[in-house]
Amino acid sequence: MPPKPKTENERQQLRTLIIDAARDLFVSRGVEAVTMREIAKRIGYSATSIYLHFADKEAVLRAICDTDFLALANALKDIMQIADPVERMIALGQGYAEFALSHPNHYRLMFMAARTPYDPAQLTLQQHSAEQDAYFQLKTVVSNVYAAARFRYDLQDVDLIAQTIWAGVHGVCSLQITMACDKWVNWSDISERLELMQAVLIRGLLREAL
Amino acid sequence: MPPKPKTENERQQLRTLIIDAARDLFVSRGVEAVTMREIAKRIGYSATSIYLHFADKEAVLRAICDTDFLALANALKDIMQIADPVERMIALGQGYAEFALSHPNHYRLMFMAARTPYDPAQLTLQQHSAEQDAYFQLKTVVSNVYAAARFRYDLQDVDLIAQTIWAGVHGVCSLQITMACDKWVNWSDISERLELMQAVLIRGLLREAL
DNA sequence: TTGTTAAATTAACAATGTTAAGTATATTGA
DNA sequence: TCAATATACTTAACATTGTTAATTTAACAA
């Protein structure tokens, strides 16, 4: 109702209002199933108003992901305080999985959805975005473990190691999220699967058993 | 043009015609981006004709997946001839990954897409569908390795082991498919990542190094 | 008071999945 | 042989969607 020039602060506030409403709906019913009109109604605006703040639906999704990557990084921050590097590494995987499994639709948006790559112009900006923080945390921990000379002798590439750990945990989580409802697999308990994956990673990567 | 009663065979033929056209388009441009009219035009029919053979778009997608699960199982069939069970297991992971990475959009449909679960009535029918074949193959190989007493002493659950291997390979592949374009990860070569994952799985699961 | 500008809305569009209604042809039954 | 029926298909039509254009409303500046 009030068409008066808004401060940057007010604009930002409305932006996050949109983001929060959209996330709520996206997460509970899937991106495709949610309409712009619905998001707008939720916050008491008309659908077209969203376009004053976001270029299109995809841009809303992208904004959600950006803030959520930050949230994940924050959730993992405490874990980074653990003293022993190997323990820290294990706990990080555990924390990551907990995030994934307790916010499956969330996780789907962030790590499983087909994303049209950002336009190249943004690629440099993105270099140090929140998005990379969680990965950076993992890489840091892996570096620590490497520095402590705990990895097998033949493992020299910190990125490669980090990506393998990520793939292992992500594999368990994403399979659970997508396929858990398929009864033709006699699924073991998810916590057992996660535990075995962690054990396999540890045994496969570290110099000797924990 | 020719409205004469069709034999069951002819009907089946048209069904696969639709499936093949749809898959082609889905795989190259994504499910959401492809319209029913487009699929129809591709095979020279009107859009509504598709509905004479499939309930809706989702049903077309499901039919595609069904035939493709079978194709995957077939692609893996040769590998099952390898004599040594451990080698067979490794080759199976490799074959699976090759399928995933050379048909990424395909793979996305099969193992990464949010699927509305089949209606419960079909659950029993599904029990022995093509869909489970690839998993069954994996489980068989794992059983063989288990029978050969090659797994670690504390690993007793064949399903759990199979699911962990699956998760590992799937993790590498799905991360590659979804995130490879994200430059904030300094991605190692995909074949290196796959190789390390396989090595980790082997070292983590088997009684002793290969 | 009167422009001007920003924020919002309503109207309008083209495209989509899907359903309903219509058309043509081959088989059937008399 | 000829109506009747059923089948394969098409065209029309609909409601819904993301999005753009045109319009309204209200605050500030002159």
Image (cartoon, coloured by chain):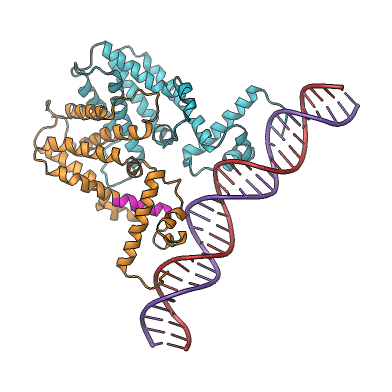
Chain colours: A orange, B cyan, C red, D purple
Indicate the position of residue D2 as horizontal and vertical percent values: 89, 30
Which residue occupies 33% across, 16% down?
A: B141
Which residue occupies 21% across, 39% down?
A: A95
Give the quarter of the image for residue B108. top left
Nearer to the camera, D20 or B198:
D20
Indicate the position of residue B163 as horizontal and vertical percent values: 31, 25
Segment tinted magenta in the rendering:
A57-67
- Compared to residue B80, the image places residue D20 above or below, namely below
Q: Is residue A176 visible?
A: yes
Please state the total of marks drawn on the protein image. 0
Which residue occupies 68% across, 25% down?
A: B6
Q: Which part of the image, by quadrant, shows the C terminus of chain A? A: top left
Nearer to the camera, A87 or A10:
A10
User: Is residue B95 in the magenta section?
Assistant: no
User: Is residue A58 in the magenta section?
Assistant: yes
Give the quarter of the image for residue B106. top left
- Compared to residue B157, the image places residue B175 above or below, namely below
- Relative to B113, A102 lies left or right: left
